[in-house]
Image (cartoon, helix red, strand yellow):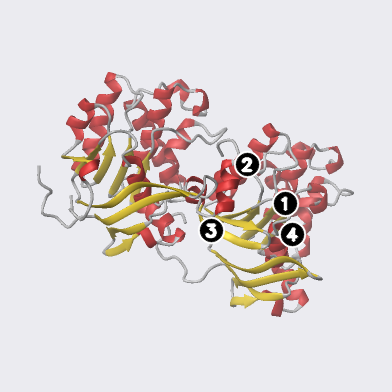
Amino acid sequence: MNAPAMTPILSVRELSKKFVLHHQGSACLPVLDRVSLDVAPGECVALHGPSGAGKSSLLKCIYGNYKTSAGSIVLRHDETETDLANATPRVLLRLRAHAMGYVSQFLRAIPRIPTLDIVAEPLVSQAPGDAEAVREARHQAEQLLLRLRIPMRLWSVPPATFSGGEQQRVNIARGLIRRKPLLLLDEPTAALDEDNRITVSALINEARETGAAIIGIFHDARVRESVATRVLEIATLRRGRIA
Amino acid sequence: MNGTTDEPELPLLRAQGIAKYYGERKAIEDASFELWPAEVLAVVGESGSGKTTLLNCVSARLKPGAGRVEFLTRHEGMVDIYALSEPARRLIARTDWGYVHQNAEAGLRMNVSAGANVGERLMALGERHYGSLREQASEWLGRVELDEARIDDSPRGYSGGMRQRLQIARNLVTHPRLVFMDEPTSGLDVSVQAKLLDLLRSLTRTLRLAAIVVTHDLAVARLLSHRMLVMKAGAIVEEGLTDQVLDDPQHPYTQLLVSSVLQP
């Protein structure tokens, strides 16, 4: 499928990432070599390729979790273009709060905080102290948890003791509660059963249909087929070709 | 960082070229950084790296040998804190700033009640009404999850974790915009530590407090801070978003630090 003729929200150009390990004889591990791609609103690009090919590293470079070694990552938001590869921490934090979301494979749980509050937090933090907004955020969190089949008796419990699949669904709910124009999904369905896979696929499609641009890693072929509008082989993403 | 669209142009605190020598021995050399409103900044590094000295220099507790520290005041814009008169500097420290010591005893008055410890900073600002002082002290004891019924107890009867909560309440009662913390959880048992971290995390987020937290514990930095400075031998060797510095450390020293601990 071809990319829609819309202005891309994200343009990656000649992005390279290598790790230099100073305590292993300054060993240099190249993981991405001059990768270029464009992603437009309403697209869901699935990154595909063997593990170790750099799929997660690409998402982490975009989110600012990894430092980019060379190249640029331009995000267009609010009529402003920002090169994420050179953005200050402050700008990255603001863009993370408003423009881009990242759902990882694992929930980094905050001890003692109940599940419902963890899911509602991205909305609550937008309006600290506004009781009405907090109520509405909690209501939306409940709706998401219901849809993702997290039993109500678990909502007031911190997710630290939940099963892997339950934690992953809490993580997805937290990652999707706030609509963001760019979503980065790193294997969001790895530990899910059939019913929940279908629910998560539906949530991803809803986000895309309402205009989000999505880049994801989906190992499960059925999920990939149901959500991706484009599949990119990570091995072919290099040396000047713009995907 | 929490979604205001009109963010101010000026940082809350700006440190430029801070240096401090003890005789020939260098404690800090040419340290510069900015802190933004509602931002939590962690300063990490091993013992003796200059973390606490830097904290003391920027919190007006220790005059640096060189450099400037500017603070964004409520009414007069950015002021050089060491150019202020002593009373003006003390007023800022008592109202707009808090300082949480590693040992709670250093930040509390052990001979007066818990309630008086919390009320003291308010009294220093001219609050004299007993009922109002007591009401605010009681409210803050509740907010740091201390039993309000023990308002008249001496902190001597409190556990280490409770004393640390009391010290935090004492600091926050004047609604400061910036809190300095020196290893706020490191003297405590692990279970008490986790509870206190949650409390600090939720207080900084809900009150939109800016904070500088000195810690040697990378897990504390991960949980509390947005951004991180890494210090080694008196110099800032790396800085960046907390998750970026921990997940993709660049400097040899940071790589060593991160690889030396169990999964922060």
Q: Amino acid at mark 3?
A: Glu
Q: Chain of mark 1?
A: B
Q: Amino acid at mark 2?
A: Leu
Q: Nearer the viewer, mark 4 or mark 1?
A: 1
| Residue to which mark 3 is pinned | B239
Pinpoint residue B17: horizontal percent, then vertical percent: 62, 73
Q: Chain of mark 3?
A: B
Q: Amino acid at mark 4?
A: Leu
The reply to whether residue A177 is visible in this rendering is no
Whole-number angstrom distance, CA of label 4 to CA of label 1: 35 Å
| Residue to which mark 1 is pinned | B47
Q: Residues within 10 Å of mark 4 (few under 14, many from 20)?
A: many
Residue B122, disc: 4
| Residue to which mark 2 is pinned | B197
Q: Earlier in the sequence, mark 3 or mark 4?
A: 4
- Tags 2 and 3 in contact by the CB under 8 Å rule? no
Q: Chain of mark 2?
A: B
Left or right, A229 with respect to A88, comes to: left
Image point (68%, 46%), residue name: B139
Left or right, A234 with respect to B140, comes to: left
Pinpoint residue A212: horizontal percent, then vertical percent: 24, 46
User: Are labels 2 and 3 assigned to the same chain?
Assistant: yes
- Nearest the viewer among A117 and A39 is A39
Pinpoint residue B109: horizontal percent, then vertical percent: 85, 52
Whole-number angstrom distance, CA of label 2 to CA of label 4: 25 Å
Q: Which quarter of the rendered picture does the N terminus of chain A lie within?
A: top left
